[in-house]
Image (cartoon, rainbow, N blue to C red):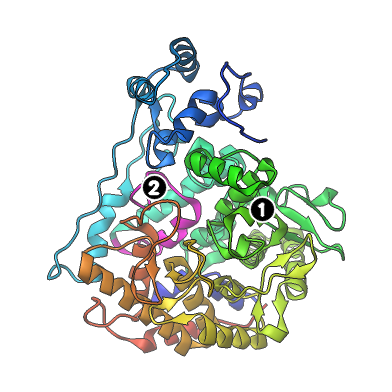
Amino acid sequence: MQPRRWGLCVGFAAALAAAGAVRGAPSAPAAAAPCIARNATCSPADLLQDLFARVQTQGLFADSKTFADAVPRQSPAAILAEYHAARPATRQALADFVREHFKIPAAATPPPIRPKSALPLRAHIAALWPHLIRKPTPPARFSSRLPFPFTYVVPGGRFREIYYWDTYFTLLGLSDGDHSAVVQSMVAGFADLIHRYGHVPNGTRTYYLSRSQPPFFYRMVALLNPQDPAAAYARYLPALRQEYAYWMKGADDLKPNHASRNVVMLADGAVLNRYWDSRDTPRDESYREDVALARQSGRPRAQLYRDLRAAAESGWDFSSRWLADGRNLSTIETTAIVPVDLNSLLYGLERAIADGCARHNDATCARNFSQLAARRKVAMNKYLWMASADAYFDYDWRHAHSMRRLSAATLYPLFVGAADATQAAAVAQAVRSRLLAPGGLVTTRVRTGQQWDSPYGWAPLQWIAVCGLNAYGDRQLAGQIARRWLRTVEIVYRAQGKLVEKYDVEMPGPGGGGEYPLQDGFGWTNGVTAALLDLGYGDAQAGSSNNEGLAQRHLQHAGTVH
């Protein structure tokens, strides 16, 4: 166990120490896709038009993502012309046409499943990495995959490409030892994505370019130098500033009670952020599901599609957090909500840029971004903090009221050092009494059938909680969450020989819900579990020594709250 491991929580440590509707497949060729006219990168839905819509809505593939990832054997324009000439009339004829003209991705090969008497959990995770790490290869011609000329790691299962916020949590398990070069490679690769596209896409597919995901890039950068994150921020300052500009685009032209892209100006002129997507069409990777929901909802389709896409940007797709009635997906209103997690991360990004600028001796930049962070913190306290409920809540900016739905997102201000001691203690009590489950931290208390609700728990949220609570001295609750989570992971591993994407933490076992079957692998579960074990939270059965004092000693280096 190495002293630098608590540096993985850097961000709290560094912060504290620093003080268009789709109505069915057209029967004739559509006009050229707008992205072609703009000379922009097109998604499969843009390029294949009515063929894409028909294949997806007829359900030729059980998973809508399969066709979005299929590789055309010739140019999409030529395939489309052949489709319009052939006009396959039956489902079988359509299937035959698709098999002839596309290379369909093979089903994912799951990582090895261990028998009950096999490796300890930590050793099993170490053995999984070679199955998830990929060497760079250029995308096949006409593929939806984006170039990424760096060694990288994928989540696993149906997720064959890089995903933005997954990567930070996955890298937690790779930052020491034999795989530290992978961390360096991926950080460089993400900086390259920002340089090429102006932001980190949701994932490395053309159909993900219209949105990003929670901005954890600065936390990934900090992993390069946990003992001196400001030095790492200084090295990647251009990419950090470019990403920040993406999230803040449109802020200068806002008026009170209006929003543009990812920014919202509230009644008093304060500016906070929301999740958003530049498209208002069905998601390529969930096309059939989105079209079906639009038909059932009776809502204007363009707004529904944008709200679904915005929820995908949040990473919490889907959750009661985004639902107007708190229950039904058809009432989704993500773009109406100012979320706690996003604004906390942007506060952290502002602080990181300020620290990087200071290291460059750019006093003006450091002062400007420190002021931006301070203003955001004031706005978060006004709109997202509710003292009467002892928690941070999302805010409905269109109707000017707090959502008052407790979720694990309430811990994000602790994770980035934006809470004061009183707020942190109150949040800890709310979490202890309402979100602490037998198997770890539950995402919400609401059962909707969505995967980001009860009874499910997710590795990233356990890490946010453990780091955030430790930052404010509540090592007892942090330890409870960590150990309960590790026991849940261990239970499933011992029973099934694998790690999975999410877990049931109410009755500890594999998770459920969502638009697709439970995935094995799994990148962020591996990363967080490995990091928690290495911090001493495991027991002998889980494959790590039990050294509770280790974390406390490393946290002595944390300073005061901003």
Give neighbour class at mark 1: few <14, some 14-19, many 20+ (Cα, 10 Å).
Answer: some
**Residue underneath mark 2:** 159
Q: Quadrant of residue 367?
A: bottom right
Judging depth in this view, the residue of 89 and 14 nearest the camera is 89
Q: Residue furthest top?
A: 85
- The reply to whether residue 2 is in sight is no
Residue that appears at 35% across and 70% down: 529
Q: Indicate which label's residue lies in the foreground, 1 or 2.
A: 2
The reply to whether discs 1 and 2 touch (Cβ–Cβ < 8 Å) is no
Q: Is residue 162 above or below residue 173?
A: above
158 part of magenta stretch: yes
**Residue underneath mark 1:** 244
Judging depth in this view, the residue of 93 and 10 nearest the camera is 93
Where, quadrant-wise, is the C terminus in this rendering?
Answer: bottom right
125 part of magenta stretch: no
Where, quadrant-wise, is the N terminus in this rendering?
Answer: bottom left
Give neighbour class at mark 2: few <14, some 14-19, many 20+ (Cα, 10 Å).
Answer: some
The amino acid type found where label 2 is placed reads Phe
Judging depth in this view, the residue of 279 and 351 nearest the camera is 279
Residue 401, position in %: x, y? Answer: 77, 69
Q: Is residue 468 above or below residue 165?
A: below
Residue that appears at 24% across and 53% down: 111
SS at mark 1? helix
In the image, is 78 to the left or to the right of 549? Answer: right
Q: Is residue 268 above or below residue 392?
A: above
Residue 139, position in %: x, y? Answer: 40, 31
Residue 504, position in %: x, y? Answer: 38, 70
Residue 456, position in %: x, y? Answer: 44, 69
The amino acid type found where label 1 is placed reads Tyr
Residue that appears at 57% across and 37% down: 196
What is the C-alpha distance between the residues marked 1 and 2? 27 Å
Which portion, as a residue range, is magenta? 152-177
